[in-house]
Amino acid sequence: MMEKKAFVTKEMIEEIVKTYPTPFHIYDEKGIRENAKALKEAFAWNKGYKEFFAVKATPNPFLIDILREYGCGCDCSSLTELMLSHAMGLKGEDIMFSSNDTPASEFAYAAEIGATINLDDFTHIAFLEETIGYLPKTLSCRYNPGGYFSISNSIMDNPGDAKYGFTTEQLFEGFRILKAKGVENFGIHAFLASNTVTNEYYPTLARTLFELAVKLQKETGAHITFINLSGGIGVPYRPDQEPNDIKVIGEGVRKVYEEVLVPAGMGDVAIYTELGRFMLAPYGHLVTKVIHEKHTHKEYLGVDACAVNLMRPAMYGAYHHITVLGKENEPCDHKYDVTGSLCENNDKFAVDRMLPKVEIGDYLAIHEAGAHGYSMGYNYNGKLKSAELLLKEDGSVQLIRRAETPKDYFATFDGFEIYKKLGF
Ligand SMILES: *Cc1c(COP(=O)(O)O)cnc(C)c1O
């Protein structure tokens, strides 16, 4: 079993809460940098390699700016993510727009800022052309082979049940149409399994896409310039899971590249990735304080965070490891449900979790909250979104997003008197 250690201590948190009360998300700059560097090195063999960070995982410009130092661009799924990337000064070629069920206005904005558009559906070829009046010289299409996605006989995920992408037939037909309409550079994209904790996912996906690319280029004459392996490299949420080794993954993809693409004369194809979870999840904690203990039919710990700060346990029953700060070395001999305050019985960060004996006032670090954590947040029960802090390499702490206030919450009631009544 891997020991899961928090990157903050009780003493650090006691200092931080003097300025920034709990709950908050805190990110570890050192960990983010080391991981981004390791990813870059793992794919350095590919000349055109680029990671487009999946902005939806953690849409914070301070964190994205750190990733940019390692050559990362942005992968956007919506208008506001495109706007954020553009406002941060990213150039068009550094922005990927991988959305689905896309509104016309978002295609128009993506085209205007020169982002690379990754089409999710065959019908979007005509939709895009009608919307912007032309087709960009570079376009990508998302592929969905259907069926199950398996690695050595074990089913990883079920693309046949997923709403995304072109079928194989549609992809060949789509490339022919796009080529006839003057598109010059083609990309292929696929996201066939989520949160994989195996070094085999990318190499297996790469083989499917590389073989497809060779056929597509041969049969349609389309010039394929990049293959986007998208997201899906996971993180070990549970202490008994073995973390992925990005170096092994990069090597695995290189082998398939040399076996399939190079002999087909396609040794100039750039590899792109759109990782979100892998880039940031382990380097973020949700820090929350125990404010109540409740002894009824079960033992409950009530904390000052709730599902609006981290939705994955409520939404997917996802496991997130919890460290009771200051009690790292005590035996986990008490069983608790760790709950938030929403009027929803699924608002539990953990169910039947073995922890050390917890007291009111203890701080909990909830692990792997650095991606798909803050960003999934919402305002149910009128709860406000928490602050985001950055633990810098020099040990200092920077506020990188303030907590919401009631004023933010009421800001969309244009014309209603509530602002005046509340004295804002
Ligand atoms: C969500 C998403 C990603 C990132 O997924 P992770 O699991 O965070 O790596 C990448 N690409 C697309 C199109 C996505 O929707």
Image: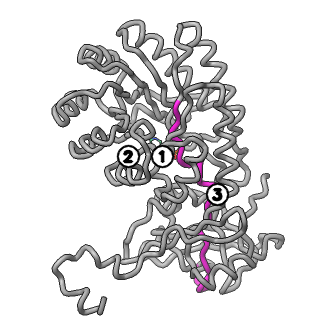
The type of residue carrying mark 3 is Tyr
Residue beneath the point at 38% across and 46% down = 77
Residue 210 is situated, as x and y percent measured from the top left of the image, at 52, 18
Mark 1 Cα within 10 Å, few/some/many (few <14, many 20+)?
many
Quadrant assignment, res 234:
top right
Query: In the image, is the residue at mark 2 within 8 Å of ligand 1 by its beta carbon?
Result: yes
Asked if the residue under mark 1 is in contact with the one under mark 2, i.e. CB atoms within 8 Å, the reply is yes
Quadrant location, the C terminus: bottom left
What range is drawn magenta here?
A: 272-297
Query: In the image, is the residue at mark 1 within 8 Å of ligand 1 by its beta carbon?
Result: yes
Name the residue tied to disc 1.
54
Residue nearest the observer in this picture, 167 or 95: 95
Mark 2 Cα within 10 Å, few/some/many (few <14, many 20+)?
some
Name the residue tied to disc 3.
283
User: Quick one: label 3 or label 2, which is nearer the N terminus?
Assistant: 2
Asked if the residue under mark 1 is in contact with the one under mark 3, i.e. CB atoms within 8 Å, the reply is no
Q: With respect to residue 201, does 208 lie above or below?
A: above
Residue beneath the point at 19% across and 76% down = 414
- Rounded to the nearest whole Å, what is the CA distance between mark 2 and mark 1? 8 Å
Residue 183 is situated, as x and y percent measured from the top left of the image, at 30, 20
Name the residue tied to disc 2.
77
Compared across the picture, whether 103 is left or right of 377 comes to left
